Image (spheres, rainbow, N blue to C red):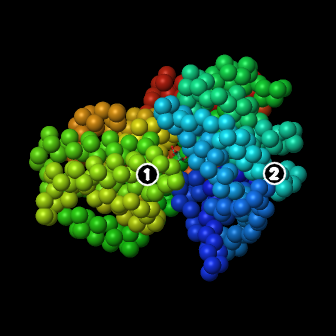
């Protein structure tokens, strides 16, 4: 690639904690960082992100440091954008997480639309754009990530008409009647249209985006070629679901320490069957509904009482928001109720952990679980489902997956459920526990093949290809996206490219 890569994301690879003892640099967890840090370590470049620090005045200074790769040798530059308390409250907790997040996950009733939040969103996006501009050299490629920074492409485009700009939207992109509810929908769309390439996990999200750009903004769109014309430029929409580093998970899973820990977990739980979910504690992840489904399962199938343990690991998330605090209490009450109803001196049906696990510990839990019950109410993709498959060394293990997770359209082999229907979830969960060995293995083999083939490297290559293709016409021979579909449906689910 000519020029350097400049990544721009709200969260970066580190959070900086300041105390009287000095500064501590703590690794942040999450799918985006896990996916992109190896790329930065291998190729160098610049990562512009908020580092968790709260400045007191605006504009606060941004800071810059070199980060060495784990193996030594190369390094990349981390440029921190410092935000004030007010900006954090209004931009991050406000517009990003109380307006865009619920809206894009179809929780319209949870949305809060506040002028003050929007004003700060505009201001903070300008700050990120300024940090990126300060790092720019001739030939650089900018890659912006996620819904926190929708205005950055347009801000950079105005200042640098020739700049190569890519954007990846990690959450669902809603249908037009839902986005239309947002008072600043046009501004958000125009912001994104500053990109050259706009990436989504699913073709469906890309199509929703094009319809929104057409209907709400008046952009000219070509659905066949998946692109929009806007202000004399062509913006190409690409669909490629993010993958996980399958080989890295396999290596992790083979570590004797991880295997010993998986065996220890099973021993400690003490039941012949173990089910698992790991999520950020978020209402979109369907944790409460899942516990309700388990309650129904234990009610209807008494043979699982004493034989099945469900482990729910919930990572703290957006803890400053009152509705997240309330949801945490509701989940803990539900766990208490189920354990009270079905537990005994030597049996605890639900083991609930409110914490973030390290990679090895998470891999050990993935290995220890006979069934993964990943049932978000809505999810852009869901990496946990893929990690569960990638961290297993055999073809045992069953994946129960929400039909409303983006990953469901890709992962044939999963048992799909409607998470809004706890009765159906309970039935499918029971079915997963009792799946005949041949079917179990066939399903897991299909899942493994998909997760192995369409891994993180594949996803990154799709992105490089899309950037390299620029405004070239769509390639008819292009490979189909991984999916559950076949024949005509599969053709319809193709990754497309090209110019309008
Ligand atoms: P998230 O909403 O954060 O991501 P997800 O895709 O499941 O959801 O990724 C979560 C990441 O956090 C995974 O890598 C997982 O290992 C990790 N994690 C979950 N629980 C954990 C725990 N208790 N301890 C430690 N780690 C934990 C957003 C979108 C998704 C999309 C991703 C990537 O909402 O739909 O799949 O971005 O694009």
Residue occupying image coordinates x 45% and y 29%: 485
Measured as percent of width and height from the top left, residue 287 is found at: 36, 46
Label 2 within 8 A of ligand 1 by Cβ: no
Measured as percent of width and height from the top left, residue 94 is found at: 60, 44
Image quadrant where residue 250 sits: bottom left
Secondary structure category for the residue under label 1: helix
443 to 215, vertically: above or below: below
Does residue 183 appear left or right of residue 345 in this picture? right
Secondary structure category for the residue under label 2: helix
Are the two marked residues, 1 and 2, in contact with CB atoms closer than 8 angstroms? no
Outermost residue toward the left? 303
Residue occupying image coordinates x 73% and y 19%: 218
Residue occupying image coordinates x 45% and y 37%: 378
Does residue 447 appear left or right of residue 57 in this picture? left
Decide: few, some or many residues near mark 2? Use Cα within 10 Å; few <14, some 14-19, many ≥20: some
Residue labelled with disc 2: 130
Measured as percent of width and height from the top left, residue 208 is found at: 59, 26
Looking at the image, which is closer to me, 115 or 422? 115
362 to 19, vertically: above or below: above
Residue labelled with disc 1: 325
Does residue 178 appear left or right of residue 443 in this picture? right
């Amino acid at each position: 690639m000519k020029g350097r890569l400049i990544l721009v994301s709200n969260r970066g690879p580190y959070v900086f904690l300041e105390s009287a003892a000095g500064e501590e640099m703590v690794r942040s967890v999450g799918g985006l960082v896990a996916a992109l840090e190896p790329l930065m370590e291998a190729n160098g470049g610049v990562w512009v992100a908020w580092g968790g620090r709260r400045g007191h005045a605006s504009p606060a200074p941004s800071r810059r440091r070199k980060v060495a790769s784990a193996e030594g040798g190369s390094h990349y530059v981390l440029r921190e954008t410092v935000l004030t308390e007010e900006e954090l409250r209004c931009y991050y907790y406000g517009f990003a997480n109380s307006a865009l997040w619920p809206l894009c996950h179809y929780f319209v009733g949870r949305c809060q639309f506040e002028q003050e939040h929007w004003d700060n969103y505009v201001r903070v996006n300008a700050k990120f754009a300024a940090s990126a501009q300060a790092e720019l050299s001739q030939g650089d490629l900018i890659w912006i990530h996620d819904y926190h920074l929708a205005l950055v492409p347009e801000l950079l485009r105005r200042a640098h008409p020739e700049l190569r700009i890519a954007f990846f939207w990690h959450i669902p992109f809603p249908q037009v009647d839902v986005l239309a509810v947002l008072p600043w929908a046009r501004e958000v769309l125009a912001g994104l249209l500053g990109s050259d390439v706009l990436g989504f996990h699913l073709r469906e999200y890309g199509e929703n985006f094009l319809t929104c750009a057409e209907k709400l903004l008046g952009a000219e769109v070509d659905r066949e070629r998946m692109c929009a014309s806007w202000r004399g430029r062509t913006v190409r929409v690409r669909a490629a679901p993010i993958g996980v580093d399958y080989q890295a998970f396999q290596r992790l899973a083979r570590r004797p320490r991880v295997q010993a820990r998986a065996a220890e977990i099973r021993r400690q739980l003490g039941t012949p069957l173990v089910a698992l979910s790991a999520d950020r504690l978020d209402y979109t992840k369907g944790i409460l509904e899942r516990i309700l489904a388990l309650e129904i399962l234990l009610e209807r199938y008494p043979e699982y009482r004493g034989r099945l343990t469900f482990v729910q690991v919930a990572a703290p998330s957006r803890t400053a928001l009152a509705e997240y605090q309330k949801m945490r209490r509701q989940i803990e009450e539900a766990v208490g109720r189920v354990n009270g109803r079905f537990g005994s001196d030597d049996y605890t049906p639900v083991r609930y952990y409110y914490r973030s696990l390290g990679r090895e510990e998470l891999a050990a839990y993935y290995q220890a679980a006979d069934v993964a019950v990943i049932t978000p109410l809505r999810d852009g993709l869901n990496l946990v489902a893929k990690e569960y498959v990638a961290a297993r060394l055999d073809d045992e293990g069953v994946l129960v997956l929400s039909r409303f997770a983006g990953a469901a359209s890709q992962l044939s082999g999963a048992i799909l459920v409607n998470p809004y229907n706890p009765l159906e979830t309970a039935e499918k969960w029971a079915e997963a526990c009792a799946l005949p060995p041949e079917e179990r293995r066939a399903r897991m083999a299909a899942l493994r093949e998909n997760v192995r083939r369409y891994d993180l490297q594949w996803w990154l290559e799709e992105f490089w290809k899309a950037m390299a293709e620029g405004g070239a016409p769509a390639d008819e021979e292009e490979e189909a996206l991984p999916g559950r579909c076949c024949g005509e449906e599969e053709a319809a689910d193709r990754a497309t490219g090209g110019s309008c």
